[in-house]
Image (cartoon, rainbow, N blue to C red):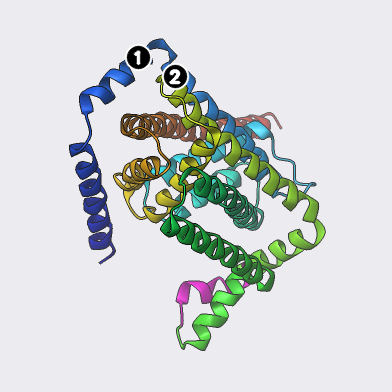
C-alpha cells in the first residue's frame, strides 16, 4: 500500500511539473542556462558552505568529551544526506546510515542515535525560525494578498506547535512516550519491546544532554540557522549569474518554502516533481520571472545530483578505508602472535 501512495505522489508531482513546463518558454530557459558557461560551478559554492555549517551544527550535538574529528563527521554526514535525498524514508534512512558509519569509528549506537535526534531537533527549530523570517519576507514581496497573509500565519502557528510538541516529547522521552502510547492503545510492537532497555537508555542520554549541555544545543541551533540563511544565496547568486537579479527578500521567501515543499514530497524519491513544482509556484508568487523559476528548479536538481554522487562516493571510500584498516589490524595481530 505504501508503494501505491508513493507512486501516486510521484505521478502527481510529475504531472504538476509537466503542466508548468507546458506553459513555459523552454527555449528561453535553455538560452538563459547557456549564458552560465564556465561560471556554472559557482552555483555549487553556497550549498557546499551550507554543508560545512550543518556539520558544525551536528558536531555540537555530541557531548564535549566525545571527540570525533570534523573531517570524519563531514564525510559521514555527506554520505547520510545522499541517502536522504534518494531513499523516500522521511529522512530515517540517512540518519540510520550516519549512525552505522559512526559506529565504525567507535561511536556507540546510543551516542550516535541520541546525536541524530538532537541534531534533527536543532535543525527543525532553526528551520522554523528561518520560515518565520521568510513569512515576513513573503508578505512583503507578495503585496496586499489576504490569502497569502492567512497562509503565512497558519504556517507560523503550525511551526510553533511543531517545535513545542517536539521538545515536550523529547523531554518526556521520545521512545518511551511511543512505548507508552502503543501500550495504551493495546498495541504490542515486538521490535520496540525487544529493545526496550536500549530505547530507554537513548531517551536518558537525550535528556541528560539537554540538562548538562544546553549551551551546545543552542550552538547547534545557531549553526543550523546560519546554514539556512546561507542557503538563500544559492538562488540569489544563480539569478544574478543568469542576468535576472532578485532581492534578498524574494530569495528568502522562495528558499525557505522550497524546503517546506520538499518536506511535503519526502515520500517521493528525491521529491522529484514536487520540489520543482514548488519552486516554480513559489517563485511566481514572489514575483520572479517564470524563466528564472524553471531554470533554478533545473539547476537545483542538477546540484542535488552532483552532491548525491559525491555522497555515495564518500560512502564507498569510507567503507573501503575501514575494511582496509580492519584487515591491517588483523594482519598486525597475527604477526605479533607469530613473533611471540
Q: Is residue 304 above or below residue 201?
A: above
Viewer-proximal residue among 66 and 58: 58
Q: Label 1 belongs to which residue?
A: 35
Q: Residue furthest front?
A: 144
Q: Is residue 192 magenta?
A: yes
Q: Residue furthest top?
A: 38
Residue 145 in picture, x, y percent from top left: 43, 54
Viewer-proximal residue among 327 and 249: 249
Residue at 24 percent of width and 48 percent of height: 16
Region rendered in magenta: 188-198
Measured Cα–Cα span from mark 1 to mark 2? 8 Å
Q: Is residue 9 magenta?
A: no
- Which image quadrant is residue 161 in? bottom right
Mark 2, secondary structure of its residue = helix
Magenta span main SS: helix
For marks 1 and 2, the one nearer the N-term is: 1
Residue at 61 percent of width and 75 percent of height: 176
Left or right of 291 on screen, residue 193 = right
Q: Counting other residues with Cα less than 10 Å from the Cα at mark 2, is it few (<14), some (14-19), or many (20 or more)?
A: some
Quadrant, the N terminus: bottom left
Viewer-proximal residue among 206 and 46: 46
Quadrant, the C terminus: top right
Instruction: Find out whether the residues at labels 1 and 2 contact each other: C-beta distance under 8 Å.
Output: yes
Q: Label 2 belongs to which residue?
A: 241
Amino acid at each position: 500500500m505504501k508503494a501505491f501512495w508513493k507512486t501516486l505522489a510521484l505521478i502527481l508531482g510529475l504531472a504538476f511539473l509537466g503542466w508548468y513546463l507546458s506553459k513555459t518558454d523552454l527555449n528561453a530557459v535553455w538560452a538563459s542556462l547557456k549564458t552560465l558557461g564556465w561560471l556554472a560551478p559557482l552555483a555549487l559554492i553556497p550549498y557546499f558552505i551550507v554543508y560545512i555549517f550543518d556539520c558544525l551544527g551536528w558536531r555540537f550535538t555530541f557531548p564535549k568529551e566525545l571527540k570525533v574529528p570534523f573531517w570524519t563527521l563531514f564525510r559521514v554526514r555527506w554520505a547520510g544526506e545522499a541517502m536522504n535525498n534518494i531513499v523516500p524514508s522521511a529522512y530515517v534512512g540517512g540518519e540510520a546510515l550516519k549512525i552505522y558509519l559512526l559506529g565504525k569509528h567507535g561511536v556507540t549506537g546510543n551516542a550516535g542515535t541520541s546525536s541524530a535526534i538532537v541534531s534533527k531537533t536543532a535543525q527543525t527549530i532553526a528551520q522554523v525560525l528561518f520560515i518565520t523570517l521568510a513569512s515576513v519576507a513573503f508578505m512583503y514581496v507578495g503585496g496586499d494578498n489576504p490569502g497569502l497573509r492567512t497562509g503565512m500565519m497558519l504556517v507560523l502557528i503550525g511551526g510553533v506547535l511543531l517545535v513545542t510538541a517536539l521538545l515536550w516529547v523529547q523531554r518526556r522521552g521520545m521512545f518511551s512516550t511511543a512505548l507508552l502510547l502503543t501500550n495504551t492503545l493495546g498495541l504490542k510492537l515486538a521490535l520496540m519491546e525487544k529493545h526496550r532497555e536500549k530505547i530507554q537508555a537513548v531517551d536518558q542520554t537525550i535528556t541528560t544532554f539537554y540538562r548538562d549541555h544546553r549551551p551546545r544545543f543552542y550552538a547547534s541551533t545557531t549553526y543550523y540557522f546560519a546554514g539556512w540563511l546561507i542557503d538563500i544565496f544559492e538562488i540569489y547568486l544563480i539569478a544574478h549569474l543568469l542576468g535576472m537579479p532578485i532581492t534578498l527578500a524574494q530569495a528568502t521567501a522562495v528558499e525557505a518554502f522550497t524546503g517546506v515543499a520538499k518536506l511535503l514530497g519526502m515520500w517521493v524519491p528525491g521529491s522529484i516533481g514536487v520540489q520543482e513544482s514548488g519552486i516554480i509556484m513559489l517563485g511566481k508568487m514572489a514575483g520572479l520571472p517564470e524563466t528564472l523559476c524553471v531554470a533554478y528548479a533545473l539547476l537545483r536538481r542538477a546540484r542535488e545530483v552532483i552532491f548525491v554522487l559525491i555522497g555515495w562516493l564518500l560512502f564507498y571510500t569510507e567503507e573501503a578505508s575501514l575494511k582496509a584498516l580492519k584487515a591491517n589490524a588483523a594482519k598486525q595481530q597475527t604477526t605479533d602472535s607469530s613473533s611471540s
